[in-house]
Amino acid sequence: MCVSNILDAVFSGLTALGTIGACVISLILSYGKYKHKLDCVFIWGTPGNYKPTILISNLCSRVIVIRTIDVFYERNRVAYFNLLEDFKVGNKAIIPAESETRISLDADKFEFKTLKLCNDEQKGKKKTLKIVVTTSSGKKFTSKQKYSSSEVVGLLFGNGLFNDAS
């Protein structure tokens, strides 16, 4: 009789631990749906649009508001865009849940002060083009792509960034 009471208490305790463990696991799994997730990438040479364009995908089930976009190449900032102050692209700053938007950036704001053309030995060496998107809550999302400087020059010339006005 004493052994059966002990076994009942042990099994009751294990049942309670299992219930608590199942609740914790369900909370952890449901948290992933509400966590902010963004993915961004440059789209070069979109048809009919000769501006550098960023495709930003909102992968979570919440609306996200983008505050700023920073573009870096070779660890140097080459462009900065504040979407909440820029009226041209400000309407694209709000991204609905589980959707994507294209933001065309102003080509005049790109400043490649340190961009050097590769010589023959460095043509294979690729450097990072990094996009940092900051949301209104202060979270930063980073996307990186590797391009050689000759590829970046080719992409930017193709998109009309270095048009000569004269």
Image (cartoon, grey):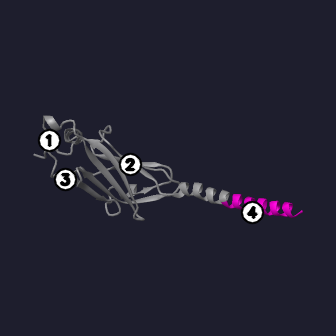
* Relative horizontal placement of residue 36, taking residue 75 as reference (left or right): right
x, y (%) of residue 110? 22, 52
| Distance between the alpha carbons at the discs numbered 2 and 3 | 21 Å
Q: Which mark is residue 111?
A: 3
Q: Residue at x 36, y 56 (%)?
A: 133
The magenta stretch is 1-20
Disc 4 vs disc 3: which is toward the camera? 4
| Distance between the alpha carbons at the discs numbered 2 and 4 | 48 Å
User: Which residue has dot 2 on it?
Assistant: 40
User: Which residue has dot 4 on it?
Assistant: 13
- Dividing the image into 4 quarters, which one contains the N terminus? bottom right
Q: Nearer the viewer, residue 149 or 12?
A: 12
| Distance between the alpha carbons at the discs numbered 1 and 2 | 27 Å
Q: Furthest-top residue in view? A: 120
The answer to whether the residue labelled 3 contacts the one labelled 1, judged by CB atoms less than 8 Å apart, is no
| Distance between the alpha carbons at the discs numbered 4 and 3 | 66 Å
User: Which residue has dot 1 on it?
Assistant: 117
**Kind of element beneath mark 3:** loop
The answer to whether the residue labelled 4 contacts the one labelled 3, judged by CB atoms less than 8 Å apart, is no
The answer to whether the residue labelled 1 contacts the one labelled 2, judged by CB atoms less than 8 Å apart, is no
Q: Residue at x 71, y 59 (%)?
A: 19
